[in-house]
Amino acid sequence: MKDQAEELRLKLKMAANEKTPKTLAVVSGKGGVGKSNFSLSFAISLSLKGNKVLLFDMDMGMGNLDILMGKTSEYSIVDFFEGTVPLKKAIMNGPEGLRYIAGGSGLSHLVKLDEEHVEKFTQELSGLFIEYDYVIFDMGAGVTDESLKFILSVQEIVVITTPEPTSITDAYAIMKHIHLVDSSIPFYIVINRVQSEQEGQQTYTRISKVLKSFLDRNLIRLGTLPDDRNIQQAVRRQIPFILYNEKSSASKSLSDITERYCRQQFSEKPATNTFQFISKLKQFLFER
């Protein structure tokens, strides 16, 4: 089985497109911390810098990215996994050149992803990769056996938390869960709803010390987002907050985060992740 996996990786490398996008998963230990709001505005901010971005809503059956944009999506990722449409047809146009795939909502059941589903997904996604600079997966809160396959396959993970003790505890829990399976994927963290930059720094210091002490892992501080009422107003009006008021403190902070990320201006440098998304996702099918 190992030889088979190695042969597959070599074939994928030989057939790889000249252009390979950066893949990220945005995760949180609990719901209600602003994860999807961040994912959407971060993706748009990257797009505004001239990047081609594809955003997946992976909270299947309970997705809300299209709602945050005030859009009604004809198809969702659930339609693809249920065999209704090819992946390319599920891609919708978002604001400022963003392309996205909705998660679907109001379903009476959740899709159970087996190896056949993931195999189909990797085949169709690999054909789309050449079109994008970034592919971002907005994962559902927490982690399941299905979502873990995708989280472990990306190059980088962005963890969203708030200064609340329960949110911090849950953020550590999800990072620990991921780390125990794969300790090589870099963790970035965004602290949302901070009252001050000092509170954000204190929250980061608290989490990073625990991560270093118990897991011997470095945590990369991507930035903070203030507790800005413009975000709540943007949600009510179904406009991404980065576009609702570009002069708001939240929008300025998000732009700073995007600039810092693109320039990789961090005191802690992320480790190089040598495996690409498709290869890693295939690895879970053939080796696990």
Image (cartoon, rainbow, N blue to C red):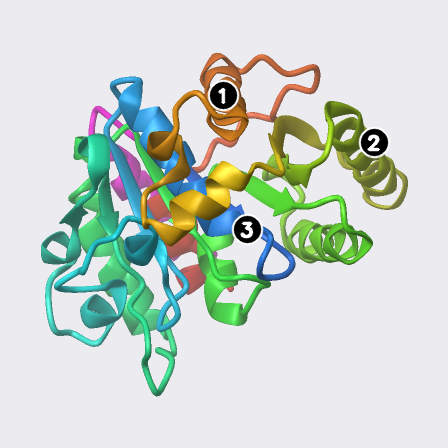
Q: Is residue 63 magenta?
A: no
Residue located 87% across and 46% down the image: 214
Q: What's the mark number on residue 252? A: 1
| Residue 55 coordinates in the image, percent (x, y) | 31, 45
Residue neighbourhood size for the residue with mark 1, other residues' Cα within 10 Å, grouped as few (<14), some (14–19), many (≥20): some
Q: Is residue 20 magenta?
A: yes
Residue located 69% across and 20% down the image: 268
- Amino acid type at mark 2: Gln
Residue extent of the magenta highlight: 1-21
Q: Secondary structure at mark 2?
A: helix
**Residue projecting furthest to the bottom:** 108
Q: What's the mark number on residue 27? A: 3
Tell me the quarter of the image containing the N terminus: bottom left
Pointer 2 with pointer 1, Cβ within 8 A:
no
Residue 166 appears left or right of 56: right
Q: What's the mark number on residue 202? A: 2
- Amino acid type at mark 3: Val
Q: Secondary structure at mark 1?
A: helix
Judged by its main secondary structure, the magenta piece is helix
| Residue 209 coordinates in the image, percent (x, y) | 87, 35
Q: Secondary structure at mark 3?
A: strand
In the figure, 229 relative to 1: above or below?
A: above
Q: Nearer the viewer, residue 213 or 183?
A: 213
Residue located 54% across and 69% down the image: 144
In front of the other: label 2 or label 3? 2
Q: Nearer the viewer, residue 256 or 230?
A: 230
In front of the other: label 3 or label 1? 1
- Residue 47: name its quadrant: top left
